Structures are given as structure tokens and as C-alpha cells.
Amino acid sequence: MGFGHTNNFIRPGNIFRACPAAVLQQALDSGAYDRGVIVAEGFDYEIIDKAYAPYENLSLLVSLKSTGDIEKKVIGSVTECLKADYQFENDWTRLAEIFRKPSLQMISFTITEKGYGVAPHDLERGLTPVLAMGKVAALLFGGGVQSMVKVFSIVCLSSCYSGMFNGTGLLEGFRGGLNRLSKRILPFGSILLTSIITVMISCNQALAIMLPQQLCVDTEKDPETMASHLENTVVVIAPLIPWSIAGAVPLASVGAPTACILTACYLYLLPLWNYAAAIRRSVKK
């Protein structure tokens, strides 16, 4: 298993050292990347004791050329090696800590197809599993899920606002204004405008879907058409707002810059196309 506070690799054997670790080394040498990988071994712990720890996680990649030449390259892209087993308390605690880090973006495996098997009896062990998938599940339960608690709490809390606004009658005044506005810019345009504003204020997709539906319920009375309008507006607009969870969390997960939102052509072309189509239908009428 391998991590690198952005990456984690499981089963760091010969294939890993000769391929993924070597590719990462090239990226480090070229300056295209700036951090190494953390590896974890969940089966053959001698790999850590004999191949990594004595040599400060360095490996020697030897390539035999068809010309008879021998090419040697030191691979130093591994920053940390751990034993993925609860019996090794310090290593297991360290892995759980890594899984809790928001900076962990990828977990990779070099294991055979049997390693991906999930055995019911292993899952029944709870937090003391023996097989690879059981160990990953235990680490996710103890770390990966915890790292999402804040995001989950924000979504749940903000979703409560929808019922609060609706129950207190706070939205009544806005509904009348949006209904009048829809006669000038069409129902789709009214829903589109409402979607943009609610996403920018609520910062998450869940509340942003609920509020336009409640605000524009008098603007578009047909439930199926309303559902289609919401799908073509707020659902795709939410990821375009940099501070919205729908956009910020995926970008942070892969370490992508905010500017890449500009390349999400489908997300902004879809509502524009549908609005143009709505205008065209209105003109024909």
C-alpha cells in the first residue's frame, strides 16, 4: 500500500520499486512533483525489515540493455515505510493518522486479484482484520471517514436551513418577486438566477437544490419540468463556484488548482444551451 500525504501505496514489492516508484522518481527529478510516497506492507513484513529500513528506503533499479550495457539508478521516492497490521502498534497508529489527513489523496495497490477479495469472517474481526481489504476498511473507518466529518456536518446543518426558511414564511416575499421576474426572463432564467445566488450563499449543492425549488415553485408548476430545470441549472452550477463544497472538495482531493474550473465546459454550457433553447421556444410561441 502506498501514500505520500497525497499518495499511499500498498504492497511495495519489486513491481512497485521498478515501476510506480521509478516513475515518481522521474517526476521528482524533473520538478513536476514535490513529494514522495508512503508505503505500507500488509503481508510480507520482511520487505520492510530487510529491503527498506536498512537502506533508508532507497532502492537500486538495475536495467539490462539489449546492447549488454547495465543501467543503474537510485530510487529515493519512498519517504516512509510502515507495516499495515494492528500487531505493530506504532505503525498501525501512524497509518490511521495518515488516513485522517486531508492531504491524503490516493491509495494504490500492487496485489493479486485474491488480495482484493473481501472475506466475511475477516470483516467480522472489526478493527483487527488480517486481509488487505479488511485492513483498508478498518483504516478508513478509523481515519478516512473521520476526515469527512466536517464536510458531512456542514451539509447536514445547511440542509436544515431549507426547512427553517420554508416553515417561517421567510421565502414568501421572494417567491412573488421571482414569479414576476420569470415573466421577463422566462421561468428557466428565473431558476438559473436563483440557482447561482443560492449556491454562492449556501456553499453546498444540497441546500442550493432545495431553495430554488421552494423559491420558484410558483414560477414553474409542472414537477417534471421543475426537476429538469434544476438538473440543468443548480446541479451543474454548484461545482463552478470555487467556495462551494461541490467544487472545492473534489479539487482539494486531487490537488487541482481552482483555475481548472474554467475548463469544465459542460458545466456552464449546459445551462446556457438550455436557456437559449427556452428563449427560442418562447419566441416561436
Image (cartoon, rainbow, N blue to C red):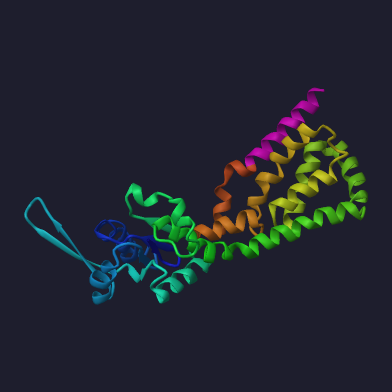
Left or right: 139 with respect to 221? left
In the rendering, at what x and y percent does residue 102 appear? 53, 66
Q: Is residue 76 left or right of residue 122?
A: left
- Quadrant location, the C terminus: top right
Q: Quadrant of the N terminus?
A: bottom left
- Which residue appears at 82% of the width and 32% of the height? 222
Q: Position of residue 146 (x, y in %)?
A: 58, 65
Residue 215 placed where, x, y %? 84, 46
Identify which residue is drawn at 92% across, 49% down.
Answer: 172
Q: Is residue 273 magenta?
A: yes
Q: Which residues are magenta?
A: 269-285
Q: Is residue 112 left or right of residue 237?
A: left
Residue 17 part of the magenta segment: no
Say which residue appears at 60% left-offset and 58% top-offset: 248
Q: Quadrant of residue 152?
A: bottom right
Q: Does the rendering let one see residue 257?
A: no
* Residue at the image position 53 percent from the left and 66 percent from the top: 142
Predominant secondary structure, magenta span: helix
